[in-house]
Amino acid sequence: MTADIARIRETIARSRMLRDAGHVEAVLRSEFQGRLRLMFPDTAHETWINNYTEGTEAHTKVGTGSGKAASRFIDNLVGSTTIEYESDLRNTAKRDTGYAQVQEQAAGLVRAGTPVSTVRGVLSDTVEWYAYDAVLAAGVDPSSCTAADIALVVIDELKLPDDSVLSAEQLGGFIKKHLAREQSRPLRSEFLASDLGMDSAAYKSSAGPLSLLVDEERKADPSADLATDLWSQFVDHLEGPAGTFRTAAYVDEAYVTLLARLLSANVLTGKAVLSTDDELKAILNGEFFRNNFQLENVVEQDYFGWLLSPSYIDRLVAVARDLQRDLYAYDFRWYPEEDLFGRFMAQLARRSQRKLLARNGPRTGSPVCLPTVASTASRTGKAPGSSICAADPVRCSRKS
């Protein structure tokens, strides 16, 4: 997702001039916002820029020492990134005021239910930029936290001494990393479960189209009806007395298999991928893994295979495209030695009361331990059979 370096240089020059001329914060902020779409003209930036403009003067509730909540307004809110502007951060008093406001705003987001691990604060005068992670004090209930319960940890800072190409590239990178949140989030099980798990906004937006597709085609397509009925019989055999087909439970598992394939592609590639529709189809049907990594059995025909038929895959791609954009927030250059899907499986177990899937912690050769697949493939071009089912953790967890 490209940026226009020439336009960013113009923005820096204008921002430095306005700050040095002593203009108020509102002037600097308005100037910067008006130039955002010029600096980032690619349509891939449209969503976060829309969120930036729509999040102007966003309202939040901040807890106070008296126990009451006070209203506050955030300069700009992009998802879980709160942005506070001051007229000149070279002024210590203004810097301290801005810092305190970022602290309050972060507390307001946490109080409203945003996971603290996803909250980011940005403080700027459009020339100097500071990015913070929020840390909630131990033992504090998020729903009643105050600014005093939030510590801000500096994770990045940028000062623009001139409007050179280097400064423009640095500002473009800072904005994409901390406002657009591109490729900056650590790839950790807890973050994946929070951002994309069964209680996330990403799941909720995916579940509707998937449920509609399943319900429609169970009535219209005998192959879809047979595959879903076989899934239902298998699940009921493992879990207890037979019952009627459960669309929600089936969609839960279909969602996890889709996400795992997209996640596998990113881990194996070593970076967040933004694919064309054709490449998304190749990831979903397994051709991507066969052609690029000589991995033959990442995707196999199973209870969800009918979704990959030409009649339905375009509808599946629409869901996968949004999930892939969500994954673009993560940094895939490094990954921990942990089971990335362990928390997903626990969430799935809680939703359906499944004892089989409620396994805690990674196991040796776990099929959902994607780093095993990636590291082995990068060394040998092949992945071990015990781990290759990473693209379908639900099915494989039942097999093992």
Image (cartoon, rainbow, N blue to C red):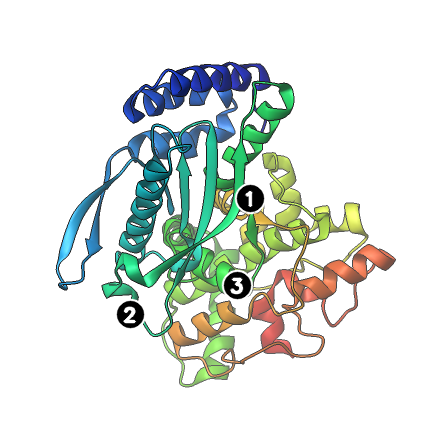
Task: Please tell me which residue is depicted at 54% across the width and 80% down the height of the picture.
Answer: 360
Is label 2 in contact with label 3 (beta carbons under 8 Å)? no
Rendered view: 326 above or below 170: below
Q: Residues within 10 Å of mark 1 (few under 14, many from 20)?
A: many
Query: Circle 2: is it few (<14), some (14-19), or many (20+) Cα within 10 Å?
Result: few
Furthest residue toward right: 380
Residue placed under numbered mark 3 in the picture: 227
| Residue type, mark 3 in image | Ala
Q: Please, what is the three-letter code of the amino acid marked with disc 1?
A: Tyr
Q: Earlier in the sequence, mark 3 or mark 1?
A: 3
Residue on which disc 1 sits: 328
Q: Which residue position is annotated with label 2? A: 141
Q: Position of residue 266 (x, y in %)?
A: 65, 49
> CA gap, disc 2 to disc 1?
30 Å
Q: Quadrant of the N terminus?
A: top right
Q: CA distance from mark 3 to mark 1?
A: 32 Å
Residue 274: image location, x then y, percent = 60, 38
Please state which amino acid type lies under the numbered disc 2.
Answer: Asp
Quarter-wise, where is residue 125 in the image? top left
Q: Earlier in the sequence, mark 2 or mark 3?
A: 2
Q: Spatial distance from mark 2 to mark 3, Cα to Cα? A: 45 Å
